[in-house]
Amino acid sequence: MSAASDTFTTFVTAVADDLDEHRLRGEGYATRANLSRFHFDRLIRATAGESPAAFRRRVLMERAAFRLVTTDATVLQIGLDAGYGSHEAFTRAFRRAYGVPPRRWRRTPRQVRLPAPNGVHFHPPGSLRLPASTEVTEMTLLVKMVEHHVWLIGQMVDRAGRLPDATLDRPIEMNIEGLDDGQTLRGVLSRLIGQMAMWNQVLASNDYDWSVERGESIASMRERLAVAGPAFVEEVRSVVADGRLDETFIDAHCEPPEVFTYGGLVAHVLTFAAVRRTVALGALASAGITDLGNGDPREWVQPAA
C-alpha cells in the first residue's frame, strides 16, 4: 500500500470513529497523520477525489438520510447529529444533496448513497465501508448458485415455448402458503424473472412495473430475462467480491420502507425462487418435458467444489 493510500485509510478510520465529534477539524486529522494541514489536505484530495471536509460532510449526510428512514428522531435532532446548527441549515444542505427536503425524503426515500469518487460510504449502523483493495477472481458458491438460477429459468422458458397457450395457462394444482395464488406455468415463469427485475429496480431506486407479468408472452419473458438475469448476477458478483453481504440498503417500495442486507436479499431470492422453480419444473414434467429433471444445482457448482 502506498503512503497516500495508507494515509487515506487512516483518515477513513478516524472519521468512522469520530462521526459525532464535530469539534474535530481538518487540523486535528492532519496532526494525527503527522502531516501539515496543507500536505494532508492535498494528499486526501488526490487519493479520495474530494477534500477531507467534503468527505466527512457527505458521510454524515448519508448517515442522516439513513436515520430519517430507520429512526423516529426529529429532523432537527438528525440535523444536529450531522453537524448542522439549525433546522434550516440542515434542510438546505439536505435538499442540495438529495434534491428534496428531509421531511419529504423521509416519506418517499430513495438511495441513501450519494455520488462519491472514492467508493467510501456510510455503512450502518455507524461505520464506513472502504471499497475492496484487491480484485477477487475466485468464483464463490453463492455466485454460482445465482448463475445456476438464471440459467435454469432460461432453460425452462425455452421449453415452455414449445407448449400451447392452453397448457401454459392451465392452473397448477398445488397450494403453497405465502407464495402465489392461482398459479400457472406462465405466471410462475414470469414471476421468477420479475423477482430479479424487481430487486434490480429496488437497488437502483426505481419503481417496478408489475403489469408486465399479467399474461406475459414467452417472447417477452426471454427479452426481460436477457436484461434482468445478467444484471442481477453482476450485482451479486460485485457484492460478494467487495465483501458487502452484510451491507444494508433501503427498500422504499415497502410500506413503511424497510432496511435489508444484500446477503438477506440474495437468500430471499434464492429461497423463494427454489420453490417456484420446483413448481415450474413439475408443470413442465406434467406437459411431457422432463429433460431438466428437478433442477438440482449440484452439477452446476461441482467445478467450484
Image: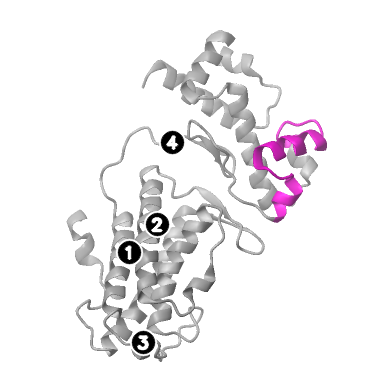
Element at label 2: helix
User: Can you identify the residue that label 4 sits on?
Assistant: 131
Task: Assess whether mark 3 and mark 4 are in contact (beta carbons under 8 angstroms).
Answer: no
Q: Residues within 10 Å of mark 2 (few under 14, many from 20)?
A: many
Given this view, does label 4 or label 3 mark the residue nearer the observer? 3
Q: State which tag comes first along the sequence, 1 or 3.
A: 1
- Residue 100 counted in the magenta span: yes
User: Can you identify the residue that label 3 sits on?
Assistant: 165
Task: Assess whether mark 1 and mark 2 are in contact (beta carbons under 8 angstroms).
Answer: yes
Instruction: State the CA–CA distance, disc 1 to disc 4.
Output: 27 Å
Q: Is residue 166 visible?
A: yes
Q: State which tag comes first along the sequence, 1 or 4.
A: 4
User: Can you identify the residue that label 2 sits on?
Assistant: 232
Q: Quadrant of residue 224?
A: bottom left
Q: Indicate which disc residue 150 carries.
A: 1
Element at label 3: helix
Q: State which tag comes first along the sequence, 3 or 2.
A: 3
Magenta segment boundaries in residue numbering: 80-107
Instruction: State the CA–CA distance, disc 1 to disc 3.
Output: 23 Å
Given this view, does label 1 or label 4 mark the residue nearer the observer? 1
Which one is nearer the viewer's eye here, 221 or 124?
221
Instruction: State the CA–CA distance, disc 4 to disc 3.
Output: 49 Å
Task: Assess whether mark 2 and mark 4 are in contact (beta carbons under 8 angstroms).
Answer: no
Given this view, does label 4 or label 2 mark the residue nearer the observer? 2
Which amino acid, mark 3? Asp
Element at label 4: loop
Which amino acid, mark 4? Pro
Q: Is residue 71 visible?
A: no
Which amino acid, mark 2? Phe
- Residue 102 counted in the magenta span: yes
Question: Measured along the vertical axis of the image, is residue 157 above or below residue 59?
Answer: below
Horizontal placement of 147 versus 106: left or right? left
